[in-house]
Amino acid sequence: MKKNRKRSKKMSVMASRSMHIGAVLVMFFVMVILNLLASSSCTQIMKSIGEKERTLAKLEDERMRESARWDAMKTADNIDRALLKFGLSMRYAKAEQIVRMDSAGRPKPGQLAVARARRSSSALRTASTSKGR
């Protein structure tokens, strides 16, 4: 049989200290690795955000150019040029030709254009009924 040997107190204290130091070193190493991974991931996210911001700025510039182009196309001179280009002969309505409507879709009272339209439609009806006789 083997003899039971007593370990010296010095050896057991050194073993426990070295185990504590080893655990602290492993935790430090794990913390450094996690910090590097987090830093790398943040860098990638920042690059992605930068690309998105550049794309947004580019699209905003393009929208502003298109808006300015559209506003330029809507001027009266450009509309007239476009109408002439396609052979259309159109003019803006005169003030007495404009009929203003209320929210219910009926013409507002007291407008000259409405009175003229009613007179001309009644004249057309009487002319068509007299022709039919």
Image: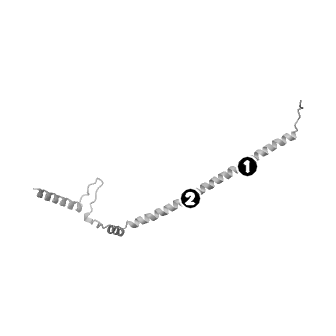
Q: Position of residue 64 (x, y in %)?
A: 46, 63
The answer to which quarter of the image holds residue 7 is top right
The image's colouring method is: one colour
Disc 2 residue type? Glu
**Upstream in sequence: badge 1 or badge 2:** 1
Q: Quadrant of the C terminus?
A: bottom left
**Mark 1 in CB contact with mark 2 (< 8 angstroms):** no
The dot on residue 51 is 2
The dot on residue 29 is 1
**Element type where label 1 sits in the image:** helix
User: Who's the residue at 49% across and 63% down the image?
Assistant: 61
Callout 1: 10 Å neighbours few (<14), some, many (20+)? few
User: Who's the residue at 48% across and 63% down the image?
Assistant: 62
Disc 1 residue type? Phe
Relative to the observer, which residue lies in front, 30 or 10?
A: 30
The answer to which quarter of the image holds residue 89 is bottom left
Q: Is residue 50 left or right of residue 18?
A: left
Q: Looking at the image, is 27 positioned above or below residue 121?
A: above
